[in-house]
Image: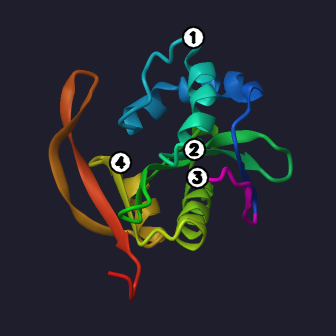
């Protein structure tokens, strides 16, 4: 079982999603720029998808498979995005980091702050020794976030994703904790 923590950073509160977040998820993730920048967010964002997605979080955390948290502003509680550790493997002490931040909140460091909090929590509380992440090759902002939180370039996955009917490359990043490799 993966615990569902509430994490605080200087400006953010990362907490479990609740059903009341669905409308904000629909609005933020429904922006075509979010879909274009991620491998999994659909566009158009279907009605009811946010509710289903949020409802899936608890059972996946209980199964120890993934942790998804709402990224909110500490001062107002306003939802700005999501961050996750996916494909958690206790046997291999690894997980895949993911995140998206709504376009009104871009270029403010929120993705970096949220990603760093999840990397720190995963290594400290879950005992992870390896964290990987992928981003679309053209998404230089996401690649910069991954580098800022300590992940290193590990390679290019050619035509790894299909976005808007076109094969696109993904960049692979990884972190192996010193002394544990």
Q: Main secondary structure of the magenta part?
A: loop
Highlighted range, magenta: 1-10
53 with respect to 91 (left or right)? right
Mark 3 residue crowding within 10 angstroms, few (<14) / some (14–19) / many (20+): some
Mark 1 or mark 2, which is nearer to you? Answer: 2
- 155 lies left or right of 13: left
Mark 3 or mark 4: name the one nearer the start of the chain: 3
Dot placed on the residue nearer the N-terminal end, 1 or 2 = 1
Query: Is 97 within the magenta?
Result: no
* x, y percent for residue 60: 53, 38
Q: Are marks 3 and 2 in contact (CB under 8 Å)?
A: yes
Please report contact status of discs 2 and 4: CB closer than 8 Å, yes or no: no
Measure the alpha-carbon separation of dots 1 and 2. 24 Å
- Quadrant containing the C terminus is bottom left
Tag 3 secondary structure: loop
Q: Residue at coordinates 77% horizontally, 49% vertically from top-left?
A: 73
Identify the mark nearer the N-term, 3 or 2. 3
Q: Nearer the viewer, mark 2 or mark 4?
A: 2
Q: Which residue is mark 3?
A: 2
Q: Which mark is residue 47?
A: 1
Looking at the picture, tell me which residue is in the foreground, 45 or 88.
88
């Amino acid at each position: 079982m993966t615990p569902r923590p509430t994490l605080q950073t200087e400006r953010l509160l990362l907490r479990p999603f609740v059903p009341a977040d669905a409308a904000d998820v629909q609005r933020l993730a429904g922006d075509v720029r979010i879909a274009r920048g991620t491998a999994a967010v659909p566009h158009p964002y279907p009605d009811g998808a946010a509710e289903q997605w949020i409802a899936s979080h608890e059972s996946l955390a209980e199964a120890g498979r993934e942790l998804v948290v709402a990224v909110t502003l500490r001062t107002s509680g306003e939802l700005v995005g999501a961050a996750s550790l996916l494909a958690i493997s206790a046997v291999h002490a690894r997980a895949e980091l993911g995140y998206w931040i709504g376009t009104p909140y871009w270029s403010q460091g929120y993705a970096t702050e949220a990603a760093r909090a999840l990397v720190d929590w995963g290594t400290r509380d879950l005992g992870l020794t390896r964290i990987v992440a992928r981003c679309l090759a053209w998404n230089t902002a996401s690649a910069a976030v991954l580098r800022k939180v300590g992940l290193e370039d590990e390679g290019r996955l050619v035509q790894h994703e299909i976005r808007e009917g076109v094969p696109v490359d993904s960049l692979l990043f990884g972190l192996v904790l010193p002394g544990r490799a």
